[in-house]
Image: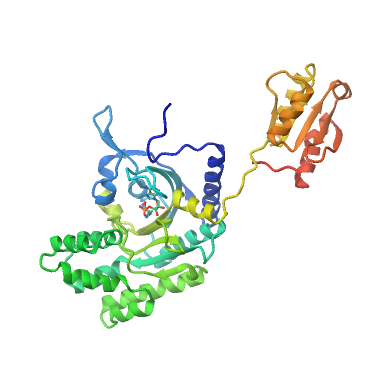
Amino acid sequence: MFDTLPGFRDFPPEACSRRNHLFRVFRTVARAFDFKEYDAPVLEPLDLYVEKSGAEIVGQLFHFEDKGNRQVALRPELTPTLARMVAARANSLPKPIKWFNVGEHFRYERPQKGRGRSFYQFNADLLGESAIAADAELIALLVAIFETLGLGVQDFKIRLSDRNTWIFLLEELGVSEEIRPAVLNAIDKSERRKPEQTIESLEETMPGKGEFLWDKIQEIKKIDSLDTLIARLKSGTQKADNIIQDWQNITDLLKAHGADSYITIDLSIVRGLAYYTGFVYEAFEASGKGRALAGGGRYDHLLKKLSGNVDMPACGFAIGDMTLSDCLESKGLLPQYVMAPDLYLIAGEEEKKHGISLVSKARKGGFSTAYSLKSCGFGKQFKDAGKSGARYALILGSKELETQNVKIKDLRNASETTVPQKSLLAKLEEFDTEGGIQSA
Ligand code: HAM
């Protein structure tokens, strides 16, 4: 016997239909926000991720040499791929570009609750627009998706932070541009590390200043309201005033979208990926327990870094399917699926072939229809129809065949109607509009 590899999942029909429920909501809500679906390869050149995604993700890559001696990697995320795709078509695409994708991703992480080595993400990105309205539009989309799945203010929170604010405050503390990525990385990791480890990393980056920086960083990480943030930024310089203006702007826009009740300002979020440049955020269960449900932010320089010549502002986020499914399941918000066919044909030996032509007609009409593939008596067929969970049996015996009729039996209450075969579809549609037929 072979098992799945660690961190990989099988999706038997019930699990698949639960997953498809998420995908359906992702697609419907993204379309309502006028985002267009795109797709891309799951295997990419290794170099696409080295440096662009940051050290943490590079350490988690599934990578190998292909038969053409190319260094390749299974995609751990979609953002570098999207940046490459858009940069290659930058001149021909009308702006703003609002694209989404639902697809599989791979990271060699330690499998644990909410973390796998293969997982699905819904990615939504908005490119070609530097206005904060774009960041707000994305956060509103994230909120609308969670609301459509049945989650409310008591269930999830979006922790909003800003890399520009961090950069400004770090500059005040003497952190120069060259060491900034290492410091931001240490701040991101500090959420999951002992303080001594963070101090050690900071000390390596800024010798003699590790402890001092850590004290200041802890103060900043505690900022959790617009008022404390404004007080800390100290209005008066152009830079500080611009940052305050951006915060006020996004707060007002999120209010207009009706998303403000889900937002908490939380400077402890900096995001692990290297390319973020502005507002960043992560969604968590309101209890604060568990890994992030989603994460994203602005990445204005990634296209330029990848393409060399296309400079285009961009922002986006991704929702992961694993933590989200766990969250929905714990709140009883994953629907039970009817996996049964609508109809089950029950026919005599002689009438079977004609019955199959009725099956074919019903299927073309959109009704999921099953029948016994083996030849067997009426009794066994009735038993199988019951087991299948079908709502109606289509019964075709010698009498029905002779009179060109077919009997429709409601398997829930045993009531029967005989209809001419030529009006079968019309009759089924009538039942359907009355709510009698529920397809999976
Ligand atoms: P990320 O924060 O690395 O961002 O991943 C987004 C979400 O994917 C996480 O919040 C989590 O739900 C899910 N996820 C990540 N790794 C795993 C894993 N090993 N197992 C299960 N779920 C996982 C990004 O990937 C960015 N590219 C998002 C983005 C799009 N930024 C801009 N546009």
| Figure check: 397 above or below 327 | above
Q: Residue 217 location in percent, x, y?
A: 24, 70
- Which image quadrant for residue 316? bottom left
Of the 4 image quadrants, the one containing the N terminus is top left
Answer left or right for 364 relative to 261. right
User: How many labels sit on residues?
Assistant: 0
| Figure check: 292 above or below 217 | above
The colour scheme used to paint the residues is rainbow
- The residue lying toward the viewer, choosing from 61 and 127, is 61
Answer left or right for 340 relative to 145. right
Q: Which residue is farthest top?
A: 350
Answer left or right for 182 relative to 371. left
Q: Is residue 126 visible?
A: no
Q: Is residue 352 visible?
A: yes
Residue at position x 75%, y 47% from top? 435
Of the 4 image quadrants, the one containing the C terminus is top right
Q: Residue 402 location in percent, x, y?
A: 88, 21
- The residue lying toward the viewer, choosing from 9 and 241, is 9
Residue at position x 51%, y 51% from top? 26
Q: Residue 353 location in percent, x, y?
A: 75, 19
| Figure check: 220 above or below 383 | below
- Which image quadrant for residue 414? top right
- The residue lying toward the viewer, choosing from 300 and 248, is 248
Q: Residue 144 location in percent, x, y?
A: 52, 60
Residue at position x 50%, y 38% from top? 11
Q: Which residue is farthest left?
A: 208
- The residue lying toward the viewer, choosing from 25 and 266, is 266
